[in-house]
Image (cartoon, rainbow, N blue to C red):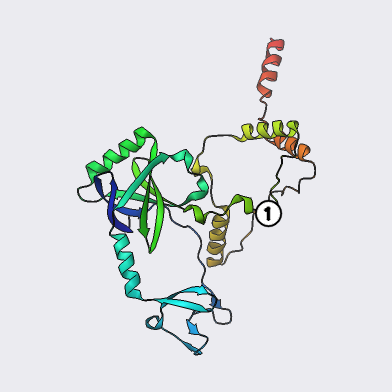
C-alpha cells in the first residue's frame, strides 16, 4: 500500500512513528477527449492571453488575488519553507471526544495509519485506549500543502485518520433556501412514515450496494470493444410527484409487506380432511 506521508502521532508525551495510506479509492470510469474526425487525444496547453503565447511550467508563479485583478505573488521558496515547517511537526492529538458528537457533514476522507519502525507498542496502546474509552482523537495534519483537521479512530484493528472540515468550511443550514420552518403533516402521516422506516430497517451491509451506472458503463465499453450490440435493461417505473402524501405512504407500506406463506397451511388442512 502506497505511503502518502511519514511522521509521528503524539498524545501527551507518547510519540508514535507512523505512515499514512489512502483508505479509499475512486472507481470512476475515466474518459479521454478526442478530436472526432481523427480520434486524436486533445492537448490542453497553458496560454497567456496577454502575451498570446503558450507558457511552460518554469514561467509560472503562484499568487493570491486579494481584490479583482490585483495579486500578491508568492515565491516558491517561501511556500516550500512554510510547508516543510508544518510537515515536520508531529501530529499532536489535541482533544479526545465522542464520535457521536461529530456530525457526518464534517468528514472528508479516510486514511489508514500504520506504525513505522519502533512504533508498534505505542500504536497498540493508543488503539486499545481508544477502543476502551470509545473516544476519537482530534488532531491537525499537513497533507499535500493543506492543513487538515482530523479525527483518529479505530476501524477493524487499524488506526484511521479521518480528515474533517474546519467549522468555517461548512455552510450554515440556515442559508439553505425553501426549508419549511414548521412541520406540515398529520399525526397519521407521521405514524405511517415511521412504520415504513421500521419495515425497511436492517443492519448496514455495504457489500449489498453497488454502482449500477459504473457497471453498465463498463458493460457498454466491453460490448463496443467486442463489436457487439449493447442493450440497456428496462427501467424501473419512476415514482411520480407526490400529490397525495398519505396515499403515497400507504402504497409504500403495501409494497413492503412480507409475503404470506399460506399454500402449505391450506395443503395441510386438505390432507387431514381426506384422511
Q: Nearer the viewer, residue 204 or 260?
A: 204
Instruction: Tell me how many marks there are.
Output: 1
**Residue in the image at 72% along x and 11% along y:** 273
Q: Secondary structure at mark 1?
A: loop
Quarter that holds the C terminus: top right
Residue 272 in sight: yes
The furthest residue to the right: 243
Write down the residue under mark 1: 177
Residue 128 x, y percent position in the rendering: 31, 36
The quadrant in which residue 133 appears is: top left
Q: 172 above or below 269? A: below
Quarter that holds the N terminus: bottom left
Residue 3 in sight: no
Q: Nearer the viewer, residue 110 or 145?
A: 145
The quadrant in which residue 21 appears is: bottom left
Residue 248 x, y percent position in the rendering: 75, 40
**Residue in the image at 64% along x and 57% along y:** 232
Determine whether, in the image, residue 108 is placed left or right of residue 19: right
**Dot 1 surroundings within 10 Å: few (below 14), some, or many (20 or more)?**
few
Residue 245 x, y percent position in the rendering: 76, 40
Determine whether, in the image, residue 174 is placed left or right of residue 163: right
The quadrant in which residue 155 appears is: top left
The furthest residue to the top: 275
Q: Nearer the viewer, residue 44 or 211?
A: 44
Amino acid at each position: 500500500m502506497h505511503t502518502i506521508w511519514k511522521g509521528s502521532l503524539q498524545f501527551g508525551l507518547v510519540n508514535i512513528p507512523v505512515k499514512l495510506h489512502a483508505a479509499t479509492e475512486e472507481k470512476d470510469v475515466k474518459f479521454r477527449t478526442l478530436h472526432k474526425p481523427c480520434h486524436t487525444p486533445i492537448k490542453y496547453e497553458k496560454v497567456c492571453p496577454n502575451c498570446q503565447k503558450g507558457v511552460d511550467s518554469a514561467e509560472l508563479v503562484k499568487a493570491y488575488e486579494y481584490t479583482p485583478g490585483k495579486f500578491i505573488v508568492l515565491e516558491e521558496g517561501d511556500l516550500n519553507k512554510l510547508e516543510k515547517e508544518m510537515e515536520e511537526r508531529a501530529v499532536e492529538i489535541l482533544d479526545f471526544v465522542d464520535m457521536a458528537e461529530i456530525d457526518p457533514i464534517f468528514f472528508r476522507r479516510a486514511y489508514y495509519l500504520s506504525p513505522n519502525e519502533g512504533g508498534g507498542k505505542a500504536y497498540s496502546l493508543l488503539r486499545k485506549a481508544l477502543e476502551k474509552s470509545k473516544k476519537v482523537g482530534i488532531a491537525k495534519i499537513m497533507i499535500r500543502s493543506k492543513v487538515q483537521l482530523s479525527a483518529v479512530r479505530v476501524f477493524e484493528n487499524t488506526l484511521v485518520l479521518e480528515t474533517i472540515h474546519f467549522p468555517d468550511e461548512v455552510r450554515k443550514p440556515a442559508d439553505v433556501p425553501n426549508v419549511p420552518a414548521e412541520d406540515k403533516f398529520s399525526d397519521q402521516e407521521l405514524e405511517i412514515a415511521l412504520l415504513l422506516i421500521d419495515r425497511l430497517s436492517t443492519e448496514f451491509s455495504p457489500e449489498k450496494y453497488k454502482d449500477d451506472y459504473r457497471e453498465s458503463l463498463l458493460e457498454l465499453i466491453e460490448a463496443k470493444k467486442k463489436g457487439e450490440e449493447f442493450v440497456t435493461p428496462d427501467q424501473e417505473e419512476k415514482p411520480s410527484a407526490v400529490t397525495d402524501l398519505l396515499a403515497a405512504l400507504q402504497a409504500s407500506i403495501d409494497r413492503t409487506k412480507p409475503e404470506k406463506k399460506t399454500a402449505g397451511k391450506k395443503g395441510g388442512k386438505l390432507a387431514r380432511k381426506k384422511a
